[in-house]
């Protein structure tokens, strides 16, 4: 059982964890040991609420395929167990980010005083620049 927060949890059969060989440098051991983890999470087939599923699918995350499967590749650590924990932690983070609802932005206008201060500053700045001009010696 994977617990995301107090109200959201996933069963273990909803997440597919596949061991694979890690990429990059690693010496002789890299070709023998499958220490990297490929996590696959099918968002549409999961037990999450429909609203949360839609919110997760609407995110512009490159790890989500066209079919709605989230793929996380964990290969930071040397052991398979640490990579497994890292992949699950990243899945929890992704889902908990989807539960956060952004505040709706309300358009605002500057106050009358703010407009007046802005124009006063502009006029003052213009006067200062005008004083920098050439001096007439008549």
Image (spheres, rainbow, N blue to C red):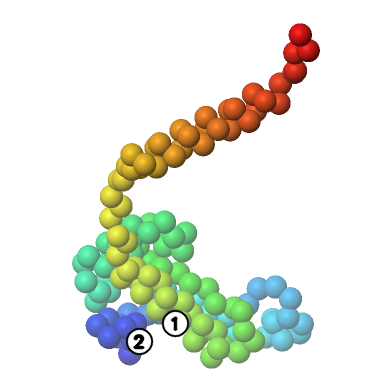
Q: Which residue is mark 2?
A: 2
- How far apart in space, not on screen, are marks 1 and 2 (Cα)? 8 Å
Figure check: 55 above or below 28: above
Q: Count the marks.
A: 2
Residue found at the far left of this picture: 50
> Residue 38 at what x, y percent from top left?
50, 76
> Residue 68 at what x, y percent from top left?
35, 62
Q: Residue at x 33, y 86 (%)?
A: 3
Residue 88's label in the rendered image is 1
Q: Secondary structure at mark 2?
A: strand
Is 93 or 87 nearer to us in this picture? 93
Figure check: 97 above or below 107: below
Residue 49's label in the rendered image is none
> Residue 6 at what x, y percent from top left?
27, 86
Quadrant, the C terminus: top right
Find residue 53 and report its image quarter: bottom left
Find residue 124 and report its image quarter: top right
User: Which circle's residue, 1 or 2, is located before the other in the chain?
Assistant: 2
Callouts 1 and 2 close, C-beta under 8 Å: yes
> Residue 37 at what x, y percent from top left?
53, 80
Quadrant, the N terminus: bottom left
Asked if residue 44 shows in the view, the reply is: no
Q: Residue at x 47, y 59 (%)?
A: 62
Q: Is residue 31 left or right of residue 137?
A: left
């Amino acid at each position: 059982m994977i617990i995301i927060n107090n109200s959201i949890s996933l069963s273990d059969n909803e997440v597919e964890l596949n061991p694979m060989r890690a990429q990059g440098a690693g010496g002789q051991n890299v070709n023998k040991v499958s220490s990297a983890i490929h996590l696959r999470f099918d968002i549409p087939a999961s037990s999450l609420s429909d609203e949360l599923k839609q919110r997760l699918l609407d995110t512009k995350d490159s790890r989500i395929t066209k079919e709605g499967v989230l793929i996380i590749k964990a290969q930071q650590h040397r052991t398979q167990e640490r990579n497994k924990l890292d992949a699950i932690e990243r899945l929890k983070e992704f889902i908990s980010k989807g539960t956060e609802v952004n505040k709706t932005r309300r358009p605002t206008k500057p106050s009358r005083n703010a407009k007046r201060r802005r124009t006063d500053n502009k006029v003052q700045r213009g006067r200062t620049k005008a004083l920098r001009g050439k001096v007439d010696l008549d």
